Image (cartoon, helix red, strand yellow):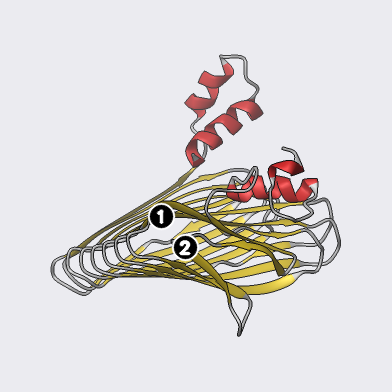
Amino acid sequence: MDIKDFKFDLSLTPTDRTMLAEIADMVGTPDGAFNIRKNGEGVVKTSTENIEIRQKLDKPGIDIIIKPFTVAEKVHIPVIITESGVQETVYNDFFIGEGANVEIVAGCGIHNCGDEESKHDGIHSFHIGKNASVKYVEKHYGAGDGNGKRIMNPTTIVNMDEGSYCEMDMVQIKGVDSTYRKTEANLEKGAKMYVLERLMTHGKQEAKTDMVVNLNGEGSSAQIISRTVGKDDSVQVFYPNAVGNNACHAHVQCDSIIMDNAKISSIPAISANHPDAQIIHEAAIGKINNDQLIKLETFGMSEEEAEEIIIQGFLK
């Protein structure tokens, strides 16, 4: 991709462009509203007729206001850090109007070639209006050949009005040394939520997830799926909790592949505070299926190539 593909006035390095493609699928100036944050500062911001992005005045971050009944529009809000030692906490609030149907593409990439720790803590709060529908994609990615750590700690708070829908695709691609992911969701009558977390750790990386979904309204429902791969000496801990406070449905599923000397703890919890709450959880941790390896190796693949194909399919 050439820099001319970006129509806004911003000097982007090859590293910047690579990271924007990895975390937000941005290979040029996107259609619709977008905001790019780089090394602790907002560098470019564009609103549309239906989606307004406002810079916060009291703390770092932005407000994204989506008008009621906005349909088939996207918002891109990537964050990139390319300097060693940058540490920030950013607050983003999303206000999605009644009946809107939109996609929000977020993500954070840290390229650290120095010796200092670089860290991004993103606190995202969603206010999803009645009968609105939101797809939220968040990708985390780390790179760089320095000794400085790449740390990302996302906090996500979701408040869903009656009849709304929220789909969240939370992905940690690679290269993140430490992450603590916290999510809280509150669902009103008839609200539906689908969460898919996909994560891979290697080396001595650590990843922890705390997730609480409160099903407060009658007829609300949630499906929470976690798929993770742990390699080398990495450590993962996953704590999802579905809380049924009314007549509702929820399903929590945690599946992990463990390799080498990794350690994985999957501790799903379910809580029912109403006699008509129906909540299910299941969890599985295991090695790559040996029969699958052998089958792929008969096609001429090495063991390493076969493992990579299986992992990619598992995390897809």
Taking 291 as reference, is 212 above or below it?
below
Q: Earlier in the sequence, mark 2 or mark 1?
A: 2
Mark 2 or 1, closer to the camera: 2
Q: Give the residue at the far front of this rendering.
A: 49
Closer-to-camera residue (279/196): 196
Q: Residue at x 51, y 29 (%)?
A: 290
Q: Position of residue 313 (x, y in %)?
A: 50, 34
Q: Secondary structure at mark 1?
A: strand
Q: Which residue is mark 2?
A: 51
Of the pair 283 and 82, the residue shown nearer to us: 82
Q: Say which mark, if any, is on residue 273.
A: none
Give the farthest residue toward the top.
299
The amino acid beneath tag 2 is Ile
Element carrying mark 2: strand
Image-based side of 13 in relation to 293, left or right:
right
Label 2–label 1 contact, CB within 8 A: yes
Q: Distance of mark 2 from mark 1, alpha carbons?
A: 10 Å
Q: Relative to the observer, which residue lies in front, 303 or 193?
A: 193
Would you identify the image quadrant in which residue 14 lies? top right
Tag 1: amino acid = Val
User: Does any portion of residue 146 appear in the rendered image?
Assistant: yes
Q: Residue at point 55% right, 37% down?
A: 311
Q: Residues within 10 Å of mark 1 (few under 14, many from 20)?
A: many
Residue 173 visible: no
* In front of the other: 230 or 75: 75
Left or right, 145 with respect to 16, comes to: right
* Numbered disc total: 2
Q: Residue 110 at what x, y percent from top left?
A: 72, 57
To which quarter of the image does residue 98 belong? bottom left
Residue at mark 1: 102
Residue sitting at x 61%, y 82%:
57
Locate the N terminus and report the quarter of the image it occupies: top right
